[in-house]
């Protein structure tokens, strides 16, 4: 029937975009025919009126205004006809009038609370509008209703939409819902992608990787599968393989900020200089994104461009002056360009803003030791030790700070700790430590 074909088209058109943000790509199969007249609604005619059939013919031809006019005339005298209300909602939906569509779907549900198609359509609409909290009850109710002649495949679409909604916050529920869908209709590549995304969200990386690779076996150019697999490989620290799949995904969406950010991440992890131009392009496209700006600043600093790096850290701090991570990066650059008193002040501020940041305490300890504040250096090292283990450089800072305060036994102990840990990696400092340890031991 024409009516059945319209509802099948609605499911096929809208189910794929039911979850926001970042839904899997839609390639869901259309539902079979549904005949809502198989069970008489609580009000309205038992058989569709000619006016409704005429409107549905116009819908089939995408003659939206003609269909809308016919339905408006009919609903003026039959305001509780659930079939006409649903058709009118569909017309509004197809014309990208979501507010009107929502009202009409809700009126259709009020007229016939057991309307499977109205609940599904409303749920899909709300999910597309980024309102999963309201979408979920509609879709859940639809899974409990008789879909009529639409049959199990139509109900499977409702389960799939639920799985997309639950994917992020409730991956276990999403997995169960996808399994219910697969009991009712055959698995598609979109289902495999959804299963992979659910496994990824649940931290089940081997399962996610296997699912993405199954899709790529059949469709090696799938941007969704390449992007998803790259995300999993990054989590598994398989950076070269992740880079390969990110570049494949970027062939389809070269300006995608998320993919470019992940590409920059894997390039940085591999110490590849190409990370800098990738991040600069990202920053140019998203100048207000503090995460991108901080990443660019960090990479420039690692490359030795401390002045260029500091430009971007200061850019972040101009907007958010209490950004502890940016303050730490800024302070590290100041140390490298030997602006030690300025670095001391910056690290001191960072530790006040975020007392749990060990990098801030490390920076303060070093800056304090180089600006004749050994007591502050010891305090900073004490705070740092709450969050990170000691390393040769911190043993040396402990030693020279105690040495400056003439606490000979403590200084000697830390010089020895440093020599035990350094293992020949810091020859200049090791020479100094041996000389001071010898003098301190003789004094003692």
Image: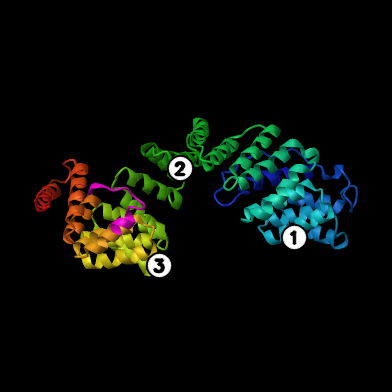
Question: Distance from label 1 to label 2 (Cα)?
Answer: 39 Å
Q: Is residue 347 left or right of residue 410?
A: right
- State the image coordinates of residue 300 (x, y, percent, origin top left): 28, 55
Question: Tag on residue 231?
Answer: 2
Q: Residues within 10 Å of mark 1 (few under 14, many from 20)?
A: some
- State the image coordinates of residue 408 (x, y, percent, origin top left): 16, 55
* Quarter of the figure with residue 234: top left
The residue tagged with tag 3: helix, strand or loop?
A: loop
> In this figure, which residue is indicated by the disc labeled 1?
103
Question: Tag on residue 359?
Answer: none
Q: What residue is rendered at 80% in x and 41% in y?
A: 146
Residue nearer the viewer, 162 or 129: 162
Q: Residues within 10 Å of mark 2 (few under 14, many from 20)?
A: many
Q: What residue is rendered at 47% in x and 42% in y?
A: 227
Question: Distance from label 3 to label 2 (Cα)?
Answer: 29 Å
Would residue 113 be seen by someone viewing this image from the given angle? yes
Would residue 61 be seen by someone viewing this image from the given angle? no
The residue tagged with tag 1: helix, strand or loop?
A: helix
> In this figure, which residue is indicated by the disc labeled 3?
320
């Amino acid at each position: 029937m024409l009516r059945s074909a319209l509802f099948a088209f609605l499911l096929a058109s809208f189910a794929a975009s039911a979850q926001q943000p970042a839904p899997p790509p839609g390639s869901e199969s259309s539902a079979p025919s549904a005949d809502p007249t198989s069970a008489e609604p609580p009000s309205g005619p038992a058989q569709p009126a000619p006016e409704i059939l005429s409107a549905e013919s116009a819908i089939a031809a995408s003659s939206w205004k003609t269909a809308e006019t016919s339905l408006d005339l009919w609903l003026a005298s039959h305001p509780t006809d659930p079939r006409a209300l649903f058709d009118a909602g569909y017309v509004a939906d197809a014309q990208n009038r979501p507010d009107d569509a929502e009202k009409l779907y809700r009126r259709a549900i009020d007229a016939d609370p057991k309307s499977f198609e109205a609940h599904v359509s409303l749920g899909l609409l709300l999910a597309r509008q980024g309102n999963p909290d309201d979408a979920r009850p509609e879709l859940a109710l639809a899974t409990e209703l008789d879909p009529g002649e639409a049959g199990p495949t139509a109900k499977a679409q409702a389960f799939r939409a639920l799985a997309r909604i639950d994917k992020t916050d409730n991956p276990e529920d999403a997995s169960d819902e996808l399994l219910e869908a697969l009991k009712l209709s055959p698995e598609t590549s979109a289902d495999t992608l959804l299963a992979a995304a659910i496994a990824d969200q649940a931290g089940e990386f081997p399962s996610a990787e296997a699912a993405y690779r199954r899709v790529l076996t059949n469709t090696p150019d799938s941007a969704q599968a390449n992007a998803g697999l790259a995300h999993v490989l990054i989590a598994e620290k398989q950076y070269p393989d992740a880079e390969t799949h990110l570049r494949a995904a970027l062939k389809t969406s070269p300006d995608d900020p998320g993919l470019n950010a992940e590409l920059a991440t894997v390039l940085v992890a591999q110490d590849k200089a190409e990370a800098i131009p990738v991040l600069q392009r990202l920053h140019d496209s998203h100048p207000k994104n503090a995460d991108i700006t901080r990443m660019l600043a960090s990479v420039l600093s690692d490359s030795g461009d401390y002045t260029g790096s500091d430009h971007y850290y200061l850019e972040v701090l101009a907007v958010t002056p209490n950004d502890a991570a940016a303050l730490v990066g800024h302070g590290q650059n100041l140390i490298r360009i030997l602006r030690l008193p300025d670095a001391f002040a910056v690290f001191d501020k960072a530790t006040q803003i975020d007392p749990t940041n060990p990098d801030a305490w490390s920076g303060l300890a070093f800056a304090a030791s180089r600006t004749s504040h050994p007591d502050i250096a010891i305090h900073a090292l004490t705070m740092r030790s709450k969050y990170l283990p000691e390393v040769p450089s911190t043993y040396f800072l402990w030693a020279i700070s105690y040495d400056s305060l003439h606490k000979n036994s403590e200084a000697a102990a830390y010089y020895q700790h440093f020599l035990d840990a350094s293992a020949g990696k810091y020859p200049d400092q090791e020479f100094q430590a041996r000389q001071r340890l010898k003098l301190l031991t003789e004094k003692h």
